[in-house]
Amino acid sequence: TEKFIKHDPPAAREVAALQRSVRQQLAPVAKRVSSEKFTMAFGSGGTVTALADTDGHITGESHQESLYVLRRARLKSLFELLRSQHLQERSAAIVGDPKRADILVAGAAVLLAMMNELELDYLFVSRRGLRDGLMVDLLTRSYAGYTGAWSEEQSRSESLEEVGGKYNYEA
């Protein structure tokens, strides 16, 4: 953001330079990842979650528990909207922490470039992140008797059921 975005809203040439840089830096990674056989991708973390939450708010599509499907076409529309807005408008438009408004244009550009390069039509966005996993791991290692609300098997099963339900798949 700080390297490329100098105006509010960002100038077209700033966004173009940002997009060019992202594509250049992403190309070798995308080439390596594209050789792998994968059928779905997941994202988590503040920027991805803020984009998914904002998309859901705009479209009226609610989250299923902790999982949301962010579609590339909708992300592109959201990116176009965010890049056209002044910081104050973005702050009011986004769902979640308004302090993210200054980085969401760049974050959306990076995510959109990644989805384009990897030809992903959608991305599953999880509300559970790295910190959640670290806390559960710490609890299970430190307290042998820990049987909190989250268990790996239960959570994995719930996540698979959420994905299956979203796409009308029954095992």
Image (tube, rainbow, N blue to C red):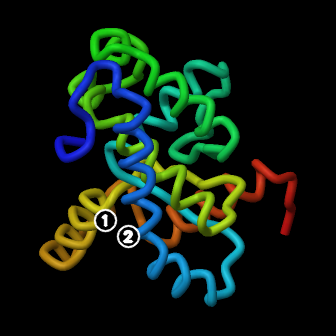
| Label annotation for residue 12 | none
Number of marks drawn: 2
Q: Amino acid at mark 2?
A: Gln
Q: CA distance from mark 2 to mark 1?
A: 29 Å
Furthest residue toward front: 13
Instruction: Please report the residue visible at 42 percent of the width from the left and 66 percent of the height from the top.
Output: 151
- Which x, y percent locates residue 9? 34, 20
Q: Secondary structure at mark 1?
A: helix
Q: Is residue 12 above or below residue 162?
A: above
Spot occupied by residue 161 in the image (x, y as percentages of width and height):
69, 58
Among numbered discs 2 and 1, the one appearing first in the sequence:
2
17 relative to 81, above or below: below
Judge from the rendering whether residue 39 lies leftward or rightward of residue 31; answer left or right: right
Q: Quadrant of residue 171?
A: bottom right
Question: In the image, residue 43 lies at what x, y percent?
Answer: 47, 57
Residue receiving disc 1: 133
Location of mark 2 (residue):
25
Q: Nearer the viewer, residue 67 or 146?
A: 67
> Callout 2 environment at 10 Å: few (<14), some (14 to 19), or many (20+)?
few
| Numbered disc 2: secondary structure | helix
